[in-house]
Image (spheres, rainbow, N blue to C red):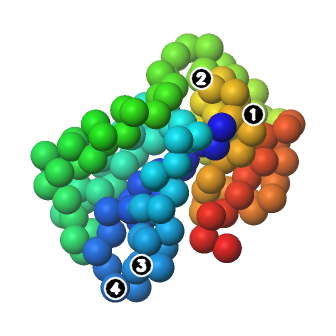
Amino acid sequence: MRFVDTSILIYAVSGAPEDADKSARAQELLTARDLALSVQVLQEFCVQATRTDRAGALTHLEAVSFATSLHRYPVQDVTLALMQSALGICQRFQLSYWDSAILAAARELGCQTVLSEDLSQDQDYDGLRVRNPFH
């Protein structure tokens, strides 16, 4: 299973001309059946996609509708155990808490890969590999 980071979702709804290739790739990715995400990713998506200073910002209802459509995938809740795991990852790999929480959620869901533009390409975090789907 592959874990989807927030940037993939943002590109999937982007109408910006400079994002056209990434948008098409993100939309293609979201047709796969082997994806998973977390509540954190959905929260980040809703915040970022509706920012009023963002070109082509979604309305609240559009963001909610898109996020709800993603419930077809396994979604990892934010729990105390997940937070504790993320804090360990944060310390071990010197990552931000938020990136560590992404990795902890992916691990909790049994993913082997994290699709992310933000984490280091091909980095291996104790058996969890990062892939940039736009390369």
Q: Nearer the viewer, mark 1 or mark 4?
A: 4
Q: Which image quadrant: the C terminus?
A: bottom right
| 127 sits left or right of 3 in the view | right
Using the image as rendered, state which of residue 81 and residue 129 is in the foreground.
Answer: 129
Does residue 96 appear in the picture of this structure? Answer: no
Q: Residues within 10 Å of mark 2 (few under 14, many from 20)?
A: some
- Which of pointers 2 and 3 indicates the residue nearer the eye? 3
Of callouts 2 and 4, the N-terminal one: 4
Q: Is 3 above or below relative to 28?
A: above
Q: How many labels sit on residues?
A: 4
The percent coordinates of residue 62 (x first, y second) are: 17, 51
Report which residue position mark 1 lands on. 89
Answer above or below: position of 59 versus 91.
below
Residue named by callout 4: 17
- Residue indicated by mark 2: 83
Q: Earlier in the sequence, mark 2 or mark 3?
A: 3
Amino acid beneath label 4: Pro
Residues under numbered marks 4 and 3 in contact, where contact means CB atoms less than 8 Å apart: yes
- Identify the mark nearer the N-term, 1 or 2: 2
Viewer-closest of 72 and 92: 72
* Inter-mark Cα distance, 4 to 3: 5 Å
Q: Is mark 1 on a helix, strand or loop?
A: helix
Q: In the image, what residue type sits under mark 3?
A: Asp
